[in-house]
Amino acid sequence: MIEDSPESFIQRWRAFAADVRLFARTEGSPLLECMADGVILQLLDRTGPYIAGPGPNRVILNPMVERLAAAEGVDVELEVTGLGELRGAGRVIGGEGRLTVVDCGVPLVIAVMDGDAERFDEGRFVRFESLPPVHGFIVPPTSRSHRRDAGESADEAM
């Protein structure tokens, strides 16, 4: 199992969310389109259609791969090869279990489907080709408590 729920996945991996620009979408469509580090990505929205609107947002980018491959002397790269398909290379910056976080210019929380696949330590460079679709988890902004300024009434603070 990769996740218990979208909420628990977001809670666990929110530190690796990518700064993206979401584009407007068709009402009722589960497809998100965003720009991350100059690359246009198509994502399967795992969080619901009304979490965030178009514009700057933080999204956990979660592609699936059969396995990661060791790569030496490669540049960081991310390329779209089809609808919901990616090819890339980058440096491992975290992970746990079957999830490996790879920095490809933006962080990707990659689910490795082959349970017997080699695991890579932080700092190693890897290559991958994803399976469709790439999942996207919109990270809601953290709530801030509103503090009243001195002299501001409770009604004015609302």
Image: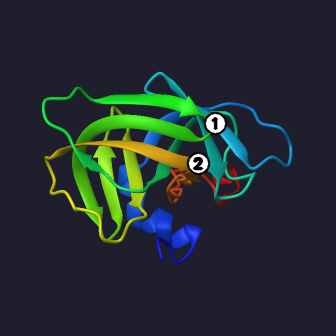
Could you tell me which residue is drawn at 13 percent across and 36 percent down?
A: 72
Q: Is residue 35 visible?
A: no
Going from the N terminus, do you reach mark 1 or mark 2 first?
1
The relative height of residue 56 versus residue 148 in the rendered view (above or below) is: above
The relative height of residue 59 versus residue 145 in the rendered view (above or below) is: above
Reading the image, the residue beneath label 2 is 132
Q: Percent from the top left, x then y, of residue 156?
A: 67, 50
Reading the image, the residue beneath label 1 is 83
Of residue 91 and residue 14, the one placed in the foreground of this image is: 91
Could you tell me which residue is drawn at 48 percent across and 37 percent down?
A: 86
Of residue 150 and residue 107, the one placed in the foreground of this image is: 107
Q: CA distance from mark 1 to mark 2?
A: 7 Å
Q: Residues within 10 Å of mark 1 (few under 14, many from 20)?
A: few
Q: Percent from the top left, x then y, of residue 45?
A: 66, 52
* Label 1–label 2 contact, CB within 8 A: yes
Q: How is the image coloured?
A: rainbow
Q: Percent from the top left, x then y, of residue 83?
A: 64, 36
Residue 71 sits in quarter: top left
Q: Residue furthest right?
A: 27
Q: Is residue 40 visible?
A: yes
Q: How many marks?
A: 2
> SS at mark 1?
loop
Identify the amino acid type marked 1: Leu
